[in-house]
Amino acid sequence: MLIIHNAGQLCTMPLHDNGPQRGKRLGDVGLIEDGAIAIRDGNIADIGTSNDILTRHPDAETVIDAGGKLVTPGLVDPHTHVVWAGNRASEFERRIAGATYQEIMAEGGGIAATMRDTRAASLDDLIAQSLPRLLSMMRQGATTIECKSGYGLDTQTEIKILDAIVALNNALPVDLVPTFLGAHALPPEYRDDVDGYVDLVVNEMLPAVTEWKAVNWADKPLFCDVFCETGAFSLDQSRHILETAKALGFDLKIHADEFDALGGTALAVELGAASADHLVATTDEEIKLLGESDTVATSLPPTPFGLGHHHFTRASEMLAQNAVLAIATDCNPGTAWCESLQLSMAIATRYLKLTQAQALAACTVNSAFAIKRGGQVGTLQPGALGDVVIWQVDDYRMLGYRFGANLVDTVIKRGEIVHSYESG
């Protein structure tokens, strides 16, 4: 048994009614002063004050003194594109000079540029390029990370990316959650035949990924996502892909309302998707639908920040309608090469107008529900995984307030120390 005690603040991030923290109730940190956690066989066995836990478990094999520091669950990143090859620094330079994301994409850049690099990379090279990013995310507090395909745009490379995700999951002391995103953009060979590419996704890719899952990811959830956006896939095309995926047993996600409101959020609610992500241009009507559903509204603050935009997810309106809000990095090579949920929280407090407590809840207990792992990660309660972060600060309000430095002291995954500030 491992005991972590003498936490100046232990933020347990509790569930509400066995579910996420909805609406205006977002921000319940479940604070225990001078708190302690007992972890047995990788799972949380007990929580309470230091005196209570040390008294109840006097024979613990390992005892960590948190030294009065802040202790929280491991952070959960529910939306990333972290597995890719190459970079798009030249496109960023063009955007600084005034080119828009849509203009670059129409010229064959954007996602298609990363597609070319990713297709050319071997599996080993793809793993080698992605590994440092994932290690960086872990060292900054993320212990569960969703990872999308979507930079292959052909069956062979999409499978290669999923293979890389599984290999990285097996190699790293964090949990990766794979998502198939074959409908991320149009490859050049289908530039003038969107419906033809949708047919490829539906009739070839989805069956191939279903077979892949049976061998490589059996008995675990696998998500299917689609980029429902102007210049990507229409509402009808997105519906066709997601309905086919659902019939094949996939769980669902959707990129929606990043630039234009096409109805993707309503589609997500209708189909019971785990989450609808981006949600910058979401309408009042669809915000209301989110509040009436269990579909998690996942905001990606680094993306509009990375694009230099001034419009962000309408978090206040969503919380007023009782929606479930989560926050992610959207780590990707084009718009948000961001490996830090700490930075996501900092942006969210300023531009989504969340309190530090709300931002922390959106990166832990709620983000777990966006990947259908609610109650398993992102919370410190008996039975949940023993995923814990000890911070260098003693007050959760420092998260979001401070930015530009990594505030993590120690990362613990399933009761094992996987990173510490002192050891590097």
Image (cartoon, rainbow, N blue to C red):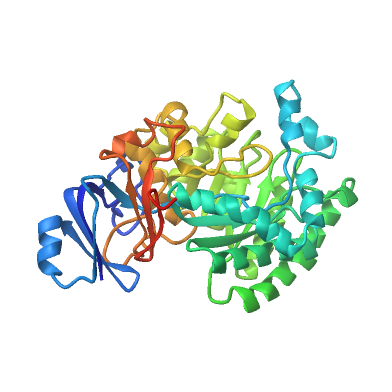
User: Which residue is painted at 63% across and 78% down in the image?
Assistant: 214
User: Which residue is painted at 79% across and 67% down in the image?
Assistant: 204
Q: Quadrant of residue 199?
A: bottom right
Task: Specify whether 349 is left or right of 209.
Answer: left
Where is 43 relative to 32, above or below? below
Task: Specify whether 215 is left or right of 155.
Answer: left
- The quadrant in which the N terminus is found is bottom left
Q: Quadrant of residue 120?
A: bottom right
Q: Position of residue 321 (x, y in %)?
A: 40, 38
User: Furthest-bottom residue in view?
Assistant: 215
Exactly how many numbered labels are in the figure?
Answer: 0
Q: Quadrant of residue 46?
A: bottom left
Where is 260 relative to 365, above or below? above
Is residue 20 visible from the viewing direction of this image? yes
User: Which residue is painted at 50% across and 42% down in the image?
Assistant: 340
Q: Position of residue 367 (x, y in %)?
A: 44, 51
Q: Position of residue 292 (x, y in %)?
A: 43, 47
Is residue 282 visible from the viewing direction of this image? no
User: Furthest-top residue in view?
Assistant: 97
Task: Specify whether 409 is left or right of 228.
Answer: left
* Nearer to us in this view, 84 or 284: 84
* Nearer to us in this view, 121 or 31: 121
Q: Position of residue 43 (x, y in %)?
A: 32, 68
Task: Specify whether 338 is left or right of 208.
Answer: left
